[in-house]
Image (cartoon, rainbow, N blue to C red):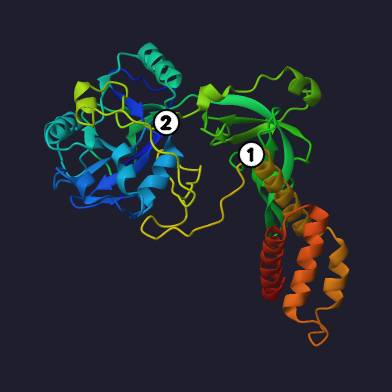
Amino acid sequence: RQVMLAQKWESRLDPTGWWMSEKLDGVRGYWDGKNFYSRLGNQFPAPEWFKAGLPSTPLDGELWCGRRQFRRCLSIVRNRSSGKLWEYITFLVFDAPSLKEPYEQRVAFIKRTLSQGCPHAAAVGVVKCTGREHLDRELKLVDSKGGEGIMLREAGSAYENKRSKVLRKVKSVHDEEAKIVGHEGGRGARGFHCGALTLETPDGRRLFSCGSGLSAADRQDPPAIGTVVTYRFTELMDNGYPRFPVYVGPRIDLDWAAYCASYQGPKPEDHAPGGLRKTHSILYSDAALEQSLSDRVAALPAPTADEPVASEGSEAGETEAEDEAGKEPKRKRAPSTNRREVAAKAAAAAETRSRLWRGASFRGSASASSSKGSASACSGSALQRSRSETLAEESGLDLETARGLLQEHDRSAFGQAARGP
């Protein structure tokens, strides 16, 4: 069930004659004629009433519930207890993989098939591009509406079960500066290996990780904590954090204090998702899309305490969270709603992990090391508890986080020692 994936648009290409549609920030959904599946083959627990009227022919599309609503959408479609929350999801179809006809005929088939009897599905609207200026105008338009970008499909193209040159994605890219407050990673074959930088923006939106864009040399010897760097991102998520940040390089010519003083951060209304609705509107869609949905417009109820929160790392469903959609979500303690507290805890954990891997000592290290050979003097659980409490006290972390960091470090360090040089 390999679905068709898009390549990035290249400025050297001429978009004239390509078909444009809005890039949807939902969850990729493959309808096999009976059930919905993710692009990795995990089944989504859609209610039977949501599937009503869908054909036996496979369809490729997006499970979507509005612009800037990706995380809530993913939470709904993966949770077996979502129930009526599926009323706010629409299956927006952009292709029919099993048909061998050219793209235009496949689109016509989708419109005919979904025009009647499919209250929760609709065809994605398309329009033919007249040139680069047209593409630029449409990209600015979708940006202004809070959309993710534009998809381009080559006229007359076939459906290809791979990342294809005939399907392209066009997204705006933004640059900003941030300060490094931590290093995330572990010890590799050649010593410390930085997996990502922990960055803080001038208005205090910390912590977020930036791992893309780092070279092998950067990972071996990352920029020091406190360094001001430039990063690029595609958009701000509903929580104000950048989506898909990419490291560019250090800014040696920038005074951080002066930059912070003059910095104007994003306004909440610029990235807030608002309430989910039972009616949707996307570029190039006709009235049939809204008519196919419920006429009743109502805000989606607030998430319950046990509703899982989805990850932030999926690009319109092209990557997925680690746990499978078909599994029952584990109930966890409700996280702190204070964003600064959560960010500060994450930054402290990242810095503590970096200290452990670099071999930095803390007050409990010597006593822990000297006690390894004396199992009779102290049980393993008591020893671990003492080290955890010491690390938690010195790093300002809670005991559970400190214990987890120590266990992570010990497993890797002991495994490396067992393998030998």
Graded by Cα atoms within 10 Å as few (under 14), some (14 to 19) or many (20 or more), the crowding at tag 2 reads few
Graded by Cα atoms within 10 Å as few (under 14), some (14 to 19) or many (20 or more), the crowding at tag 1 reads some
- The span from disc 1 to disc 2 (Cα, nearest Å) is 20 Å
Residue 257 drawn at (x, y percent): 80, 24
Badge 1 marks a residue whose secondary structure is: helix
Residue highlighted by disc 1: 339
Contact check, label 1 and label 2, Cβ < 8 Å: no
Quarter of the image with the C terminus in it: bottom right
Q: In which quarter of the view is residue 339 placed?
A: top right
Residue 315 seen in render: no
Q: Amino acid at mark 2?
A: Gly
Residue highlighted by disc 2: 275
Mark before the other along the chain sequence, 1 or 2: 2
Q: Is residue 151 left or right of residue 395?
A: left
User: Foreground: 32 or 347?
Assistant: 347
Residue 238 drawn at (x, y percent): 51, 32
Badge 2 marks a residue whose secondary structure is: loop
Residue 197 drawn at (x, y percent): 67, 42
Q: Amino acid at mark 1?
A: Arg
User: Foreground: 37 or 183?
Assistant: 37
Residue 89 drawn at (x, y percent): 31, 39
Q: In which quarter of the view is residue 71 placed?
A: top left
Q: Is residue 72 left or right of residue 189?
A: left
Q: Residue at x 79, y 20 (%)?
A: 258
